[in-house]
Amino acid sequence: MHRIDTPDATPDHRFTEGDPTIPLPATMVSADWLNAVQEELSGVIEGAGLTLDKARHDQLKAAIIKMITDRAAPLATTEQAGLVERATDAEAQAGTDGERYVTPKQLKDAVGTTDLTAMMRDTFAGCIVEWECETIPNLTDGKPLGIELNGAIVSLTAWPRLLRKWCGAAKNATAPAWYRCNASGVRDATGDHIRLQDRRGEFARGWDHGRGVDAGRVLGSAQGDAIRNIVGSMGSITAVVAGTASGAFTVTTPSNRSAGSSTGPTCDFTFDASRVVPTASENRTRNIATLYLVLV
């Protein structure tokens, strides 16, 4: 194919009707240009497998449609341009075809038939979350979002996804929680119930898992409270003069009796951490009470 290039064509190879007042002749159509146009058009029609028909005037359109239908060009991908075909409604619902496109309506219809609650449960069941509300909401399937981690024995028939938390057959006899059992709590690696972990009143701590900071722990095991040891000593005191004490120490007013003697002053020393820091019946950090749930 080429643009018209006869002597009467415009400098940019276009046709002109001419103007006798200038005078400017009309563009002469050459045989080689007409033959080029003819072969370009015929090539498309015959390339689509059609036979040229003098009586028809729609063969170019028919050829283009046929090439699209026959996928004469490759399907479009992220690597190359090409044809794009719309998916059928069934294909959009199946969601398995990776070559066709879907319309916004097909997408909406496909999402509308998806059980989003079941999909969410399949994705997140077994995850442990903090829930700072006493009420646990039900999802659209009528079942609760999760179960409180209170050490209860729950049915795997009712909550089959909790099997993901099972400690495994090898540890079923010794694991502190997440072991399979019967409804009475008797351990059984083939049991249809599972023991939940009890996180009420507990802090969570990352499992050491070989680091050596908190060695010897079993995953999911409980650990009692403790503090680093506080030690100190006082030497032999033969005489005490009344003075002042500070911090956690107190000193009493000297008496008229010293150790091992019926005369001489003595003082009693006491140590009480509550004089300096808040104290309680346990060691703890500042915290917020939360409800631990396992998603089901």
Image: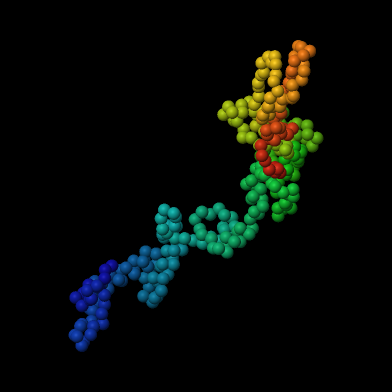
Q: Nearer the viewer, residue 143 or 48?
A: 143
Q: Residue 95's quadrant in the figure? A: bottom right
Q: Residue 195's quadrant in the figure? A: top right
In the displayed structure image, the side of residue 133 where residue 65 appears, left or right: left
Q: Nearer the viewer, residue 268 or 36?
A: 268
Q: Nearer the viewer, residue 294 or 76?
A: 294
Q: Nearer the viewer, residue 233 or 74?
A: 233
Name the quarter where the C terminus is drawn.
top right
Q: Residue 239's quadrant in the figure? A: top right
Q: Residue at x 64, y 58 (%)?
A: 113
Q: Residue at x 67, y 52 (%)?
A: 117
Q: Is residue 226 visible?
A: no
Q: Residue at x 75, y 37 (%)?
A: 151
Taking the view exactly as shown, the residue that stands out farthest to the right is 184
Query: Quick check: 38 above or below 76?
Result: below
Q: Is residue 17 visible?
A: yes
Residue 55 pos. (x, y %): 38, 77
Residue 192 pos. (x, y %): 75, 38
Name the quarter where the N terminus is drawn.
bottom left
Taking the view exactly as shown, the residue that stands out farthest to the top is 260
